[in-house]
Every structure is written in structure tokens, then in C-alpha cells.
Image: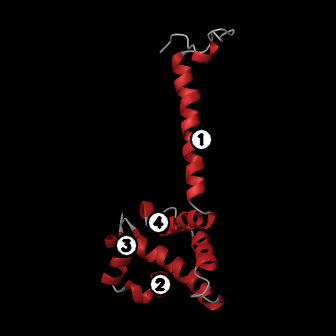
């Protein structure tokens, strides 16, 4: 891998003796492959879909809700579920999320649940879906 890299097109031109085979594959080939994959992902997914995925991730009970933040969940609701939540519901949702964070984080049956479908199922099993009806919705 420490051998000098010689491209097939450089036979008759002056070659760069400082480039190794390792450098060529690590940087030139790898970077081109990553750039291609990023471009493919960007072309396949619309911005709204990516934002929905990012905001939905905040509903996951990660690390016992240590990173739980109400703002992204409210943005998710306002942007994608505006037909289901009026301004009063949004206000109640914020209050429910604050209580939910304190209540569920200390509840043993809610520790380390993944994916979000298990969290929803556990809300129903424990009847917390009635207390946190807006979160369940």
C-alpha cells in the first residue's frame, strides 16, 4: 500500500511521485464513492421526508429520556400534523410532554424501549395512553 500510485493515463505525462496506492484508495476512490451515495440519498428522499424522520426520532425513549426535547416534537406536530392539532391542543401537548418526560422516565416498564411501536404498545398496556392522549395520537 505504500507503493507509489501510477494511473493508467499518466504513462507519458509527468507523474506525481508523492501519491501512494493507499492514498489513492483511501481518499480519491473512497471520497468519490461517498459523494455518489450522498447524492443518491439526496435525490431519493424529499426534504420533508428527511425532516419527518429526524423529528420523529425525538419520540424514541433513548437513554431514559435524557435527551428528550419538547421543541422538535412540537415542530413535528405543527408542520406535519397541523390538521389534527389546533393551537389549544398544541399548548396541551407541551404540558403533556413535560409531564410525560418526568413520569415515563422513572417508570421501570418504559426503560430502553425501541422501536417507537413498542413505546406506543406500552402506553396502551399501562393505560398511560389515556393520560397522554395527545402524545398517543
Q: Are marks 1 and 2 in contact (CB under 8 Å)?
A: no
Q: Residue at x 35, y 66 (%)?
A: 111
Q: Earlier in the sequence, mark 3 or mark 1?
A: 1
**Callout 3 secondary element:** helix
Q: Marks 3 and 2, Cα distance to the nearest angstrom?
A: 13 Å
User: Residue, x 56% and y 83% (percent of image)?
Assistant: 93
Left/right placement of residue 97 relative to residue 64 reads right
Q: Earlier in the sequence, mark 1 or mark 2?
A: 1
- Disc number at residue 137? 2
Observer able to see residue 10 = yes
Q: Is residue 33 above or below residue 38?
A: above
Return the residue at label 4.
65
Q: Residues within 10 Å of mark 1 (few under 14, many from 20)?
A: few
Front disc: 4 or 1: 1
Label pair 3/1, CB-CB below 8 angstroms: no
Pointer 3 residue: 117
Callout 1: SS: helix
Dot 4 and dot 1 residues touching (CB under 8 Å)? no
- Label 4, label 1: how many angstroms apart (C-alpha)? 34 Å
The spot of residue 50 in percent (x, y) is: 57, 62
Label ID, residue 35 = 1
Disc 3 + disc 2, Cβ < 8 Å = no
Q: Position of residue 92 (x, y in %)?
A: 58, 87
**Which circle, 3 or 1, is nearer the viewer?**
1
Q: Nearer the viewer, residue 58 or 83?
A: 83
Q: Nearer the viewer, residue 77 or 14?
A: 14
Query: What coloring was used for the rendering?
Result: secondary structure
Q: Considering the numbered disc 2 on the image, is that residue within a helix, a strand or a loop?
A: loop
Amino acid at each position: 500500500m505504500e507503493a507509489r500510485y501510477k494511473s493508467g493515463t499518466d504513462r507519458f505525462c509527468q507523474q506525481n511521485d508523492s501519491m501512494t496506492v493507499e492514498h489513492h484508495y483511501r481518499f480519491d476512490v473512497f471520497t468519490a464513492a461517498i459523494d455518489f451515495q450522498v447524492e443518491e440519498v439526496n435525490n431519493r428522499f424529499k426534504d420533508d421526508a428527511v425532516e419527518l424522520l429526524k423529528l420523529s426520532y425525538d419520540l424514541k425513549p433513548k437513554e431514559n429520556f435524557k435527551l428528550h426535547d419538547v421543541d422538535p416534537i412540537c415542530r413535528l406536530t405543527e408542520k406535519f400534523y397541523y390538521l389534527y392539532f389546533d393551537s389549544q391542543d398544541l399548548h396541551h401537548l407541551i404540558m403533556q410532554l413535560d409531564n410525560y418526560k418526568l413520569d415515563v422516565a422513572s417508570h421501570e416498564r418504559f426503560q430502553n424501549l425501541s422501536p417507537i411501536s413498542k413505546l406506543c404498545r406500552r402506553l396502551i398496556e399501562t393505560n398511560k395512553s389515556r393520560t397522554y392522549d395527545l402524545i398517543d395520537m
